[in-house]
Amino acid sequence: MSSSFPIPGGRPADAPGGTRRLASIDALRGLVMLFMLLDHVRETFFLHHQVIDPMAVDSTAPAVFFSRLLAHVCAPVFVFLTGVSACLYGARLPDGRAATAVFLAQRGLFLVLLELTLVNFAWTFQFPPQVIYLQVIWVIGLSMLALAALLWLPRPLLIALGLALVAGHNLLDGLHFPPGHALHAPWAVLHDRGWIPLGGAGGEGAVLRLRTSYPLLPWIGVIALGYAAGAWFTPAVAAATRQRRLLGWGLALLAGFALLRAWNGYGDKPWAVADSALVTAMGFLNITKYPPSLLFVALTLGVGLLLLWALERLPPASRSLQVLADYGAAPMFFYLLHLYVLRLLYVAAFAVWGDNQGAYFGFDTMGTVWLAAVALAAALYAPTRAFGRFKAQRKDIAWLKYL
């Protein structure tokens, strides 16, 4: 949701198909943000039906499982498009790499600060906080900081590094450092999802506890590959060529996922044939997000590239394309807005009915969760569109580029 870069001079209408290309990128970003909204509505108003892990095959209803699986597409697309947008930003400037590196560093630090403050408060409503969840905004910020250093590499080397991080980090899955070890905290940030206590007696008695929900290492690979793919969207690449690449690589990633998953030997936890075809399919698709496994990235980015290919093929005047692009043109605004709206709705319901979700408020089926997400998306469309247009018009307000 933070992959929107300020493009000097606006959208590159001077390049054939340029406006449409950026519209498709904005539209994909907007579409996956709506997937994210659905998942967050479920997490807020479906708590009385929640399970510990919505991807756990043996304890999760199929409707919950597949809705959560849809939301898996969000983070990889966000991070990948951050890299794409960084490449496009630099391609239009005389000192492209230097300017991009500076902006990546500034924006990355801003996002880390945002995660620690406004975003975490939206989730917990605690001040001062007792727990800080280091989630997707945090990892996008750190990935930006990493890309600020890595973009100086030759493109082939950057691609090789990105592939090595995405495909090879699962070799490190067995490496762990217990609490108290000098490498526990840095490894928790890089690869091993866990808790980092700060101050106090440590552990549960710590003054503040950090939860590294999104380990960083493979996400650096995803943003590096996005930056390398950004060259497909420059005027030097014809629309037909770009679309062939999107379609070809999208299908290749899905085929690679299917073959590697069927082999069941590397890239994620194993799956097994169950009593029914549906449960077997759920097990086959139950892939690891924290940190994102090789198979997780292959499946989600494969779907993402195919969605981008489909959006590119829509008519430029398509209403669907325009609406999705309006959501995607103000990603950080929409992200913060929907988090606070959901939290305030929950607080208001709790104030009226108390701790009685399921009896007096909340949703009992995933169908009603979907309807609520559609209604909330419609309600948030106008302010998101207005902010996006305000941001595009007021280039003189420097801090707006960070939102």
Image: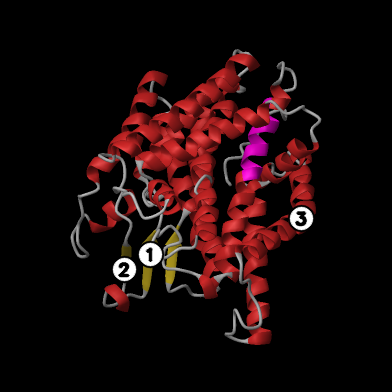
Q: Is residue 25 magenta?
A: yes
- Prevalent SS, magenta region: helix
In the image, residue 391 sits, relative to residue 362, either above or below, namely above
Marking on residue 172: none
The spot of residue 243 in percent (x, y) is 60, 21
Q: Is residue 7 visible?
A: no
The spot of residue 212 in percent (x, y) is 37, 58
Residue ID at (55%, 65%): 43
Comparing marks 3 and 1, which lies closer to the viewer? 3
Marking on residue 378: 3
Label 2: which secondary element? strand
Circle nearer the N terminus (3, 1):
1
Comparing marks 2 and 3, which lies closer to the viewer? 3
Residue ID at (52%, 60%): 64
- Tell me the residue that label 2 is attached to: 197
The spot of residue 129 in percent (x, y) is 47, 72
Quadrant of residue 220 within the rendered picture? top left
Asked if the residue under mark 2 is in contact with the one under mark 1, i.e. CB atoms within 8 Å, the reply is yes
Read off the magenta span. Answer: 21-31
Question: What is the three-letter code of the residue carrying label 2?
Answer: Pro
Circle nearer the N terminus (2, 3):
2
Q: Is residue 143 magenta?
A: no
Give the distance between the C-alpha atoms of the residues marked 1 and 2, in whole angstroms: 6 Å
Question: What is the three-letter code of the residue carrying label 1?
Answer: Leu
Label 1: which secondary element? strand
Give the distance between the C-alpha atoms of the residues marked 2 and 3, in whole angstroms: 40 Å
